[in-house]
Image (tube, grey):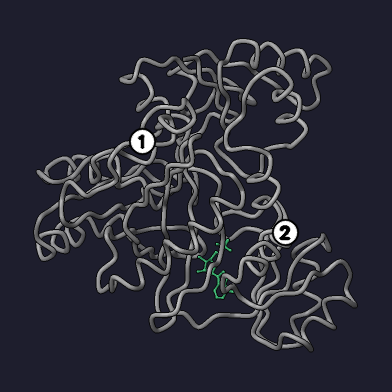
Amino acid sequence: MKIGVLGAGQLGRMLALSAYPLGHQMRFLALSEDNPSSVLGKTFIHNNNNNNNIEVIKKFSDDCDVVTYESENTDVKIIKEISKTTKVFPGNKSLHHTQHRGREKALLNKLNIPCAPYELVNSFSDLEKAIINIGLPAILKTTKNGYDGKGQFLIKSESQINEAWEKILGVESILEGFINFKRELSLIAVRGIDGNLRYYPLVENSHHEGILRLTIAPAQKISKSLQKKAESYMHSLINEMNHVGVLTIELFDIDDELIVNEIAPRVHNSGHWTIEGASSSQFENHIRAITNSSLGETSLKSKFNAMINIIGTIGPTDRVLENSNAHLHLYNKKERENRKLGHITLTSNSYKELQNSIDNLSVYLP
Ligand code: AMP
């Protein structure tokens, strides 16, 4: 099939790398040729300031059998235009709920899935009222376009209210209660067009300044009941949205209770380890799902896995390749502060060995 991706970053690149062995071809709709994916498929350049934009989008969709996207911040207008002629997975319902933090939280509440207390904030006086109701500390988050901790402000004391409102430029937001979590986890699942559903194991994520740095897969000390609880939340969400493809939920673990932080309607950074660590990767499974093929096994190939993000500078990749259990993935991006340039997967059948390998590559960790 001809598969189109809206966006052409590293997620599109890794989707392409798993789509080719399955016999597919790739198309990308991108803002420029200079991106991680263009070397892997025909790229259609669109630009909001360009008056032939609709024409480009039409040409792109006419050249695809199915279209997917790599970000929940995708413009709904583009999806609507493409949907006139070509199937888009995940569908509108997934995008509608996940690209707006208020709608996302409302959905979680409707499904009785625990999440942080929140209030919608549309004005400075809304913010003052929300602080009275929710208390401090609390996090002010823009309802749209936030990623990697961007569009957020942690309010610790009332003296910071003005600064917080200015920092997020007074746009529509939610104020969210601060959760004292023990650790951060995520769960990735894939659902086919026929409703078939598979889960990967819960993984543990470490962030620095809002950016994911390290994932341990599977997360350690996870009881069967905790995995089941996370899967039951996923089951409710993925079916409610009639989602097709990979869905990720980010969770806070607070003494064996789980609170959902965020939902992403796509392959996720905390699932990159699946390329080497699982029988079928999250990328392959997303491609299988949207092309209406059987889903692949989500079981582990190695007992213990880790993923280290390469952020800002490429670093000593020779040292990475000296490790027999390390796999290097570079995204063909230029070095820039806080930019995700690649990742390293470490696989092992011994937890001690995995920890040693992580220690060997500590230069990549904050
Ligand atoms: P987000 O963009 O919502 O995933 O937030 C980025 C990071 O901020 C998360 O991975 C957490 O480390 C932290 N964070 C977000 N929301 C909360 C919260 N309600 N309580 C405590 N920490 C949070």
- State which quarter of the image contains the C terminus: bottom left
Q: Nearer the viewer, residue 116 or 333?
A: 116
Can you give x and y, in whole percent of width and height, for residue 365 in the image? 32, 60
Cβ–Cβ under 8 Å for marks 2 and 1: no
Question: Looking at the picture, does residue 230 appear above or below residue 97?
Answer: below
Q: Which residue does the image show at 57% across and 15% down from the upper left?
A: 64
Q: Quarter for ligand 1?
A: bottom right
Whichever of labels 2 and 1 marks the residue nearer the N terminus, that label is 2
Q: Which residue does the image show at 70% across and 25% down from the upper left?
A: 83
Query: Residue at label 1?
Result: 295
Q: What's under tag 2, amino acid-wise?
A: Arg
In terms of secondary structure, where does tag 2 sit? helix
**Nearer mark to the viewer, of 2 and 1:** 1
Query: Residue at label 2?
Result: 103
Check disc 1: other Cα within 10 Å, few if <14, some if 14-19, many if 20+. many
In terms of secondary structure, where does tag 1 sit? loop
Q: Nearer the viewer, residue 283 or 14?
A: 283
